[in-house]
Image (tube, rainbow, N blue to C red):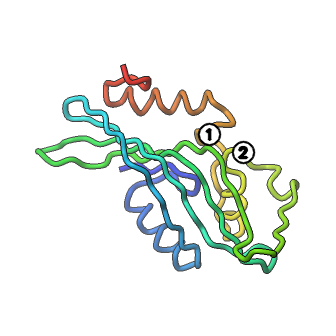
Amino acid sequence: MVVRLSWIDDSGEAFVRGSVDMAARGMKAQHRVGPPVVRLNRDRAVASLPAIIDIPTVIRGVEAQLSSHARLLYRLERRNGAWRICFLDATYARDELTASMPGQSLTVLAQDVAQYRKSYRLLCYVLGLTSYVPSQDLAGEDLPETVAALMAEVYGWAGLTADGR
C-alpha cells in the first residue's frame, strides 16, 4: 500500500507508524468522512469520499481548530478473493483555522503561509509547527490541472474514466 497525503508519501506501514508518532506529538486529528462512492471494474475499484480533517492546535497561545476539506481516493484491488487497499491519495479543496473560544483573536500573518499552496496552506502551517515538512506537489483545487491528473491516474489504474463514463 502507498499513502500520499500532506505529511507522508510512503508505505501503509510507515503511515501507521507516522500516525502513532503524530498522536504522541499531541496532534490528534479527527476525520469527518462522507459517504463513499465506489466504482468497480472487475478486480479493481476506486472509493472516493469527502473528508474534513479536524486538528486541534495552539497558535501563539490561542487554542484553535484547523479544518481541512479534502477528497480521499482509495484504490482497491481484489486478490485471492479479498479486497485490499493499494493506494490512498487526496485532493485538497480548502482549509480554515479558527480560535476555539468565541471572542478570542487568532492571528496568522500572510507571510506565515506565503510558501504554501492555497488549497491546503493552513494545514501546512499547522503541520510545520510540529516539524512536518508537507509536500507542495499534491492535487489541490488551486491548481485544477493537478486534480484532473490525479483523478485520471486513479481511475485509469482501475480501467475507469474519471468522469464516470
Residue at image coords 38%, 48%: 35
Q: What is the three-letter code of the residue carrying label 1?
A: Gly
The residue at 54%/28% (across/down) is 148
- Residue identifier under label 2: 117
Return the mark for residue 32.
none
| Residue 56 spot, x, y in % from top left | 62, 72
According to the picture, the residue beneath numbered tag 1 turns out to be: 140
Please report the residue visible at 32 percent of the width from the left and 39 percent of the height from the top: 38
Q: Quadrant of residue 58?
A: bottom right
Tags 2 and 1 touching, CB below 8 Å: yes
Quadrant assignment, res 138: top right
Label 2: state its secondary structure: loop
Describe residue 75's horizontal placement relative to residue 127 as left or right: left
| In the rendered image, the vertical position of residue 141 relative to residue 127, given as above or below | above
Q: CA distance from mark 2 to mark 1?
A: 8 Å
Q: Tell me which numbered mark, 2 or 1, is placed earlier along the sequence.
A: 2
- Give SS at disc 1: strand
Q: Position of residue 27 (x, y in %)?
A: 58, 73
Amino acid residing under circle 2: Arg
Q: Height in image: 63 above or below 146?
A: below
Q: Is residue 14 left or right of residue 121?
A: left
Left/right placement of residue 164 relative to residue 24 reads left
Residue 159 rendering spot, x and y as whole percentages = 31, 24
Rendering coords of residue 156 (x, y %): 38, 26
Q: Which residue is nearer to you in this view: 11 or 57?
A: 57
Other-residue count near label 2 (Cα within 10 Å), few / some / many at <14 / 14–19 / ≥20: many
